[in-house]
Amino acid sequence: MTVTRFAPSPTGRLHVGNLRPALLNWLYARKQGGAFILRIDDTDAERSREEYVEAIKRDLDWLGLGWDRFERQSERMDRYNAAADALRADGRLYPAYETATELDLRRKYQRQAGRPPVYDRAALKLTDADRAELEAQGRRPHWRFKLDQQRVTWVDGIRGETTVDCASVSDPVLIREDGGYLYTLCSVCDDIDFNVTDVIRGEDHVTNTATQIQIFDAMSGAPTGFAHHSLLVDADGAGLSKRLGSLTLESIREAGVEPLALLSYMARLGSSDPIEPRTTHAELIEGFDLSRFGRAPARFSDDELTLLNTKALHVKPYGDVADRLRVAGVPDEDAEAFWLVIRENITALDEIAVWATILNGGIDPVIDAEDADYVERAMAALEAAKPWTGETWKAVTGALKAETGRKGKGLFMPLRKALTGRSNGPDMATLLPLLRR
Ligand code: GLU
C-alpha cells in the first residue's frame, strides 16, 4: 500500500512553500488509495513549539487535508538511540570534536585552495588518547555518518534519473554535541518503521536524499521512492523566501481565500496540467499526476490565486457562509438573498463585511454636486415606492428617466453611489429590496 507523509518542523507557521509537499503527498496517497501520515519533526526542542503543532493541524483541517496517522519524532527517542548504537557498532557513526568556528575556518581554507568545502574526516584519524584528551578539555563530540564515497543514483518521480556523488558531500552530522538528533537519521528510522513508500519533498533535499539512501542501506531498510518538486518563485522569477512570512496559510485564510481555490491552484502549479477552479477534493485527486510536474521553478502569482478565488466564490452555496453572514450583522431573514446577490461581486470573503455595512445603511453616500438635485428627487421617489420589491428599481428609474431625460450611466450611477457609496456592485434591482435604510 502507498504510504506518504508530510513532515513539517513546528518552528513556525505553514506557508504556501510548505503547502506544496503537504498537498502533493496527500494527493499522491489519496490517488493510490493509500495512507497519509502527518509527522511532526520536533527533535529540535529549542525551536519547536506546541502552538505551531496546533496551528499546523488547524491549517490542514481548514484545507480538508486529513491524515490517517499522527506521529511526532520527540516521542521516538528510544528508537533513534537504538539506531545510533547499531550504526556506531558498525563503524558508520563516528565522533568528531570540531567547533563550528573551526569548521568554518577549514571550509574557508578549502575554498581559497580551490577545493570543495567538504569535511576532511580529520576526526577519523583521532586515536583513543586524542579523544580522551579532548574530552578531558570538556569537549563533547557530535556524531557523523560515514558516507561511502561513491555515486548514489535513484529514479526520481519528478526529476527522472538523478545522481549525487557522495565523494563531494560532507559526512552528515546525525547527532549534535548536546546529544540531540538531527532530522536526517530520525526521518530514515521513521520512514522504515511507518512503511513509508514515497517521499515527495522540495529539491533542496536532493543531497539529503543521497545521504539518506546510504543510511537506509546501513540500517538494512529498503529506501522509499523519492520525488523532488521544484521550489516556488514569485511572478518575476525571484525566490519567494523573503515573502513567505506574509504568505502563511493563516494570512491567506484570513484574507478570505477559499480552501478549494488555494488547493486548485497549488495542486497543479508547476505541472503541465491546466490550473482550473475545482469545487471538490475528489476532482483534484482524480486529475492528479505527479509525472506531469516538471523541474522548472513554479511561479506563484497572487493575481492568479485571487482570480481562482473569485471564481470559487461565485458558486459558493449559502450554507457555507451562513455563520459568517450572521457575524457580519446580516439579518437572518435577508441572509440567503443577500449572499446570492453579492457573491458574484466579491473577490474575497472579507468583503462580506463591506456589503453588510451597506445593507445596514452604515455607509456614507457619495453624491457629486452636479447630481445633488437629481439624487434628492430620486430618493423621494424611492421613499414613496416603499415597500421595495424586485420590481421597484425598474419602475422608479423608468419614471425618473421620463421626468428628467437622463439615461444610461447618468440615470443609474448617481443612485448607485448614493445608495451604496460605491460605483460598482451587484445588480441594483436585486440589491434594493435588501437595503434596510
Ligand atoms: N522536516 C523536514 C523539512 O521540513 C522534512 C523533509 C522531508 O520531507 O523529509 O524539511
Image (spheres, rainbow, N blue to C red):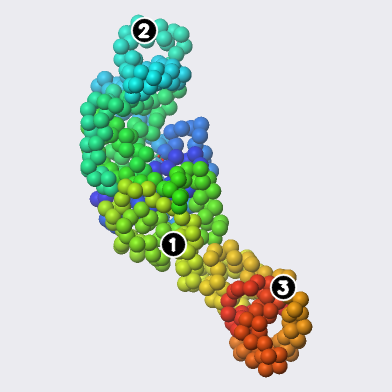
Q: Do callouts 2 and 1 mark residues in contact (Cβ within 8 Å)?
A: no
> On the rendering, which quadrant does ligand 1 occupy?
top left
Would you name the residue on which mark 3 appears?
Answer: 366
Badge 1: how crowded within 10 Å, few (<14), some, or many (20+)?
A: many
**Near-viewer residue (304 or 4):** 304
Cα distance, mark 3 to mark 2?
A: 84 Å
Q: Do callouts 3 and 2 mark residues in contact (Cβ within 8 Å)?
A: no
Q: Is mark 3 within 8 Å of ligand 1?
A: no
Position of residue 71 measured from the top left corner of the image (x, y, whole percent): 39, 42
Image quadrant in which you'd find residue 129? top left
- Residue 260, numbered label: 1
Position of residue 261 measured from the top left corner of the image (x, y, whole percent): 45, 62
Hey, what amino acid is under mark 3? Val
Cα distance, mark 1 to mark 3?
A: 36 Å
Hey, what amino acid is under mark 2? Asp
> Could you tell whether 240 is left or right of 326 in the image?
left
Up/down of 16 relative to 404, above or below: above
